[in-house]
Image: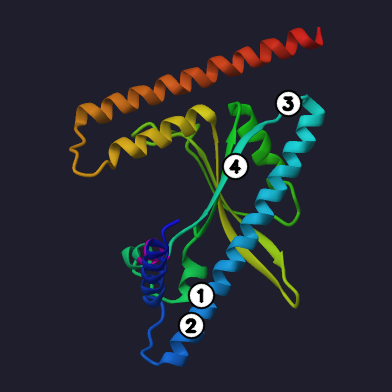
Amino acid sequence: MNNTYVKESDSIQKEQIRRFLDSDDFEKAKEGMERFRKLIAYYRCAMMEIETKFNVLNEEFSLRYDRNPINGMKSRIKDPLSMSEKLERKGYPLTLTSVEENLNDVAGVRVICSFPEDVYTLCDALLKQDDITLVEKKDYIANPKPNGYRSLHLIVSVPIFLAHEKRLMKVEIQLRTIAMDFWASLEHQLRYKKDAEFTCEMASELEYCAKLSAELDMRMDKLRRAVQESDSA
């Protein structure tokens, strides 16, 4: 990787972080930077906790049903600029305390499942665990967004155990099928392409494609049940 690019990227990120540090004093700013990095480390730990839970469930279900319900997992930490923009948009102060209290999606885990039934099976299994607290649930599979977007969104609180304390951290979880993820990924590329006009006709075509992907999920799930029934006959 180009060293110049790395230095520029680090510099940009530091400038973004400084938006949370309302101080011109070098020592205070340095202390604030450390607090920010520590908070982000806590969110990374929370992501790892959630990923581990899903990996364990995937292993268990692979033994029980002879197949893996999870096709893949992705995780990300929201960048400082996105955090500050969201806080400003919602009218919240630009402080680290405000990040913890008012942002639910700093840490995000996306779970890509094989079939729609897997989405709900994994969701139910996770929420039954006694150290997981459900903060918010939005089912965009049962009730898709107007543009056709489908996914199951959860905000959960999970404890992380540090050397001298336990902290509760929030993580956003998105559960979706391969077809849902395929549509969402390409929709984002097409809709937000730079210097390109996105017309109403294009939006209608994307919505139609979303319906096709939903039908594909339904057909594949029906085929899965048929295979399962013939195997147990």
Q: What is the number of the mark on residue 73? A: 4
Q: Secondary structure at mark 4?
A: strand
Disc 1 residue type?
A: Phe
Q: CA distance from mark 2 to mark 1?
A: 6 Å
Q: CA distance from mark 2 to mark 3?
A: 47 Å
Q: What is the number of the mark on residue 36? A: 1
Please tell me which residue is depicted at 60% across the width and 61% down the height of the picture: 44
Q: Is residue 83 magenta?
A: yes
Residue identified by numbered label 2: 32
Disc 2 residue type?
A: Gly
Tell me whether circle 2 and circle 1 mark residues in contact (CB < 8 Å): yes
Q: Position of residue 205 (x, y in %)?
A: 29, 24
Q: CA distance from mark 4 to mark 2?
A: 32 Å
Q: Which stretch did the figure color magenta?
A: 80-84
Disc 3 residue type?
A: Arg
Residue identified by numbered label 3: 67
Please tell me which residue is depicted at 58% across the width and 60% down the height of the picture: 170
Q: Residues within 10 Å of mark 2 (few under 14, many from 20)?
A: many
Specify whether residue 72 is in view: yes
Disc 4 residue type?
A: Met
Which SS type dominates the magenta stretch? Answer: helix
